[in-house]
Every structure is written in C-alpha cells, then in structure tokens.
Amino acid sequence: MELRIEQLTFEYASHPLFKQFNLTLGNGITWLRGENGAGKTTLLKLAGGALSPHSGKIWLDDIEIHAQPLTYRLHCYYCGGDTPQLPWLTVREVLDMHIALYAGADAERLNAELAAFHLLPTLDQPVTTLSLGQHKKMQLALALSLPVGLLLIDEPFNGLDADAVAYLRQQLSAPERLARQCILLTSHVEPALPLLSTVQL
Ligand SMILES: Nc1ncnc2c1ncn2[C@@H]1O[C@H](COP(=O)(O)OP(=O)(O)OP(=O)(O)O)[C@@H](O)[C@H]1O
C-alpha cells in the first residue's frame, strides 16, 4: 500500500509544525526520526486520521482521508501509547470490537499474538488495569494481526520486556509482512529493523 502526503499543513494553536510537507512511502519500514517535539507523533496521528490537516491531502492508494474517512481508517492502525477510548471495557471486549470493525480480521491470528505477548491471562480484566507494558503489548498484538495496509507505531520498543522486543523485531522483519504493509515508526534509538527508508523531521 502507498501512503502519500501532499502539501500538508498543520499547527497546534500557535505552534506551526508542518508547512506544505510532502511524503510518499511504499511497503516496508520507514523510520521517522527527529528531536523531542519535532512532530513525529503528530505526523503519525495525521496519517492515522486521529488529527485533521489544516490543508493538504493524505492518501492510501486511491483512498483520500477527507473524502472517505472511515474507509481510510479501516485500512490503517495507529499504535500510540494512548489510554483506551472506552475505559469501562475488558481487554477481551476492546479486542472483539477491533475484530468486528476490521473486515477480514482473524481472531485466531490475534489469539496467537496475544499468546506470544503473554496476554491471554489478562483478557477478562478491565482494560484500565493493564500495566503500561501490557497495554503496549495489547496494541501491538492488534497491530501485528489486523489486516491493514498501513501500520503507524509510536516508539514500538518503549516499555517492552526483552522477550517482547525480540518477538516484535522478528515479526516486523518478516519478508511477507514487508512485502504487503507500509510501516511508519518512530524511535529515538536505532530500531535494528530492515529499513526501506529514514525520514528526518
Ligand atoms: N494537543 C496539543 N496542543 C498543543 N501543542 C501540542 C499538542 N500536542 C503536541 N503539541 C506540541 O507539538 C509539538 C510536536 O509534538 P509531538 O508529540 O508530535 O512531537 P514528537 O516529535 O513526537 O516528540 P517526542 O520525541 O518528544 O515524542 C511539541 O512541541 C508539542 O508540545
């Protein structure tokens, strides 16, 4: 899948961040770099449809985010560290909601990722009771299993234990994944992944 950002302009209240910014990415991993406050998380949120550009266009193949907002969102998954939108749900209910939303989502595949991240014992807990690392793992299990063309991952390795870091590296490096997914990730340290490109903000 191709992510295309054209002439993007975005600012917070009095803080200009992007002015006529352009970026085109194909399948494979792109490392988004930049100092604290450079706008990396903001760019992931814009590309994931969680924020709207003030001007400019964002496309996934031929789907333009403003023209087809829901279709666009269902082709991508944004994995930030944000707290859950529906805090009264259990982990299982949050996951079921995603499986129901994304056409072609495979519950068995998700189960395998949850097992790999040792999350199966947490399924009936309220989602708010997960530790920071467990919450990250829940999002990563979704990121690795949902049938999306664009993955946006903010600091994938932050807060993960060593086993989870190794597992995630292996999953993100799998050639069949790199051939079918455009993956944009931020990291303050060298991600040690096979990279398509590096973008410096
Ligand atoms: N909701 C908001 N309202 C106002 N300013 C914001 C908001 N969110 C972020 N900013 C500001 O926008 C700038 C970019 O923030 P962003 O989180 O995108 O940076 P970042 O490159 O991801 O930083 P870091 O490496 O520290 O995570 C920062 O100066 C930040 O203070």
Image (cartoon, rainbow, N blue to C red):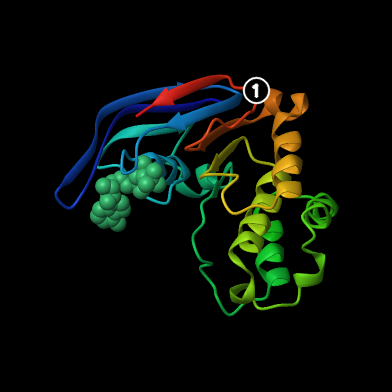
How many circles with numbers are drawn on the protein?
Answer: 1
Which picture quadrant has residue 97?
A: bottom right
Residue 144: x and y in percent read: 70, 44
The yes-or-no answer for disc 1 within 8 Å of ligand 1 is: no
What residue appears at the point 71 percent right and 65 percent down from the top-left corner? 96
Residue 140: x and y in percent read: 66, 50
Q: Is residue 181 above or below residue 77?
A: above
* The C terminus sits in image quarter: top left
For label 1, the SS is loop
Which picture quadrant has residue 84?
A: bottom right
What residue appears at the point 71 percent right and 47 percent down from the top-left corner? 162
The foreground one among 160 and 117 is 160
The foreground one among 142 and 169 is 169
Residue 189: x and y in percent read: 51, 35
**Left or right: 201 in relation to 173:** left
**Left or right: 8 in relation to 194:** left
- Tag 1: amino acid: Pro
Examine the rendering and report whether any part of residue 104 can be seen: no
Which picture quadrant has residue 93?
A: bottom right
The residue labelled by disc 1 is: 194
